[in-house]
Image (tube, grey):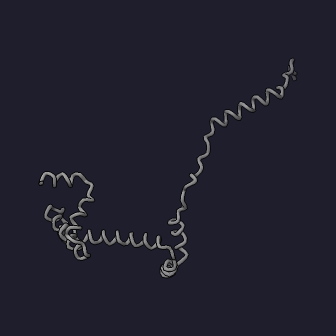
Amino acid sequence: MATPTFIVAPPKAEEIARRLEEEVCRRHVSTPEPVFRKQHDTQSYDYLCEIERKRFKQGEIDDLQATIPGPFYWECEARTLKDLLSEAIWGNIIHKHSMNAVPTTECWRNVVSDYRCLLKSEGYSTQQIREGRFSIKDQRYWKHEAECL
């Protein structure tokens, strides 16, 4: 068996420390920083409710919901139901005048007429209805009127 003719000296402590420091720096640069959630992330309560609802029957959920005291909760639900009702009325009026065909100019005039009648039945004056048009932001709408005037 051959024995080495020379002996390799072990590295000095300073060399080991320097190499370790270089490796730490190399790994720090090559490893991306963790991305933590933002401070202002909100709790996903709708998801939490979806999970919790599975524990109850619908009647029990209705009873529990009826005990919620916050006006904001009830206002949100009322606005959602208002939007659902508005969509239902919209769909019914469109169907009534278009009969499942592509709506024509005459169809849209009749839809507008029905909405004006509904607003009047809710106490709106003709002037209030006319003024309500001024909230329309689509310039294509106003272009037609400008050309007509």
In the rendered view, does 19 fall on the left or right side of 1? left
In the rendered view, does 6 fall on the left or right side of 42? right
Residue plotted at (23% across, 51% down)? 139
Residue plotted at (27% across, 55% down)? 137
Q: Position of residue 29 (x, y in %)?
A: 63, 35
- Check the picture and name the quadrant holding the C terminus: bottom left
Of residues 23 and 146, the one nearer the viewer is 146
Residue 28, above or below 38:
above
Most extreme residue toward the left, as rendered?
A: 148
- Check the picture and name the quadrant holding the N terminus: top right
Q: Position of residue 64 (x, y in %)?
A: 52, 79
In the rendered view, does 22 fall on the left or right side of 61? right
Residue plotted at (20% across, 67% down)? 127
Of residues 64 and 101, the one nearer the viewer is 64
Res 115 quadrant in image: bottom left
In the rendered view, does 47 fall on the left or right side of 4? left
